Image (cartoon, rainbow, N blue to C red):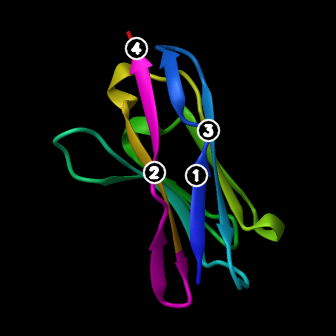
Amino acid sequence: QVQLVESGGGLVQAGESLRLSCAASGTIFSIDVMGWYCQAPGKQRELVATITSGGSTNYADSVKGRFTISRDSAKNTVYLQMNSLKPEDTAVYYCQIYYRYRTYWGRGTQVTVSS
């Protein structure tokens, strides 16, 4: 059974930074894609960033140049460095992995950015 545990969320002021982490546990070999999604109140969950096992990345337009996704495949961990945070980044951030034809989600971590 694969489990994902996120950490690193919190309350910050606009312009500050946060780093999210997500560790996958269980019997896991070479995760195909790891990523982050966010869901703001009253909105649908949407893509923030993804990274493949080969290191290719994809970002939502709204975070390009501010957020950086990275992974440590040996630790089955994905990170999201969030800089220059804006109030509109406020959301629950979910970790997701695509592994052996299945998608797994974490429970989410709250990020709140005050103006």
Residue 99 shown in magenta: yes
**Quick one: 105 or 72, which is closer to the camera?**
105
Is 43 rendered above or below residue 1?
Answer: above
Rate crowding at label 1 as few (under 14), some (14 to 19) or many (20 or more) other CA atoms within 10 Å: many
Instruction: Confirm or deny contact between disc 2 and disc 1 (CB under 8 A).
Output: yes
The residue labelled by disc 2 is 108
Q: Residue 15, how many percent across, how many down?
A: 52, 14
How far apart in space, not on screen, are marks 2 and 1 (Cα)?
Answer: 6 Å
**Quadrant location of the C terminus in the rendered image:** top left
Give the quadrant of residue 55.
Answer: bottom right
- Ranked by sequence position, the earlier of labels 2 and 3 is 3
Residue 103 shown in magenta: yes
The residue labelled by disc 3 is 8
Residue 114 is tagged as 4
User: The disc labelled 3 sits on which kind of residue?
Assistant: Gly
Residue farthest toward the top in the current orientation of the protein = 115
**Quick one: 86 or 105, which is closer to the camera?**
105
Residue range corresponding to the magenta coloring: 98-113
The residue labelled by disc 1 is 6
How far apart in space, not on screen, are marks 1 and 3 (Cα)?
Answer: 7 Å
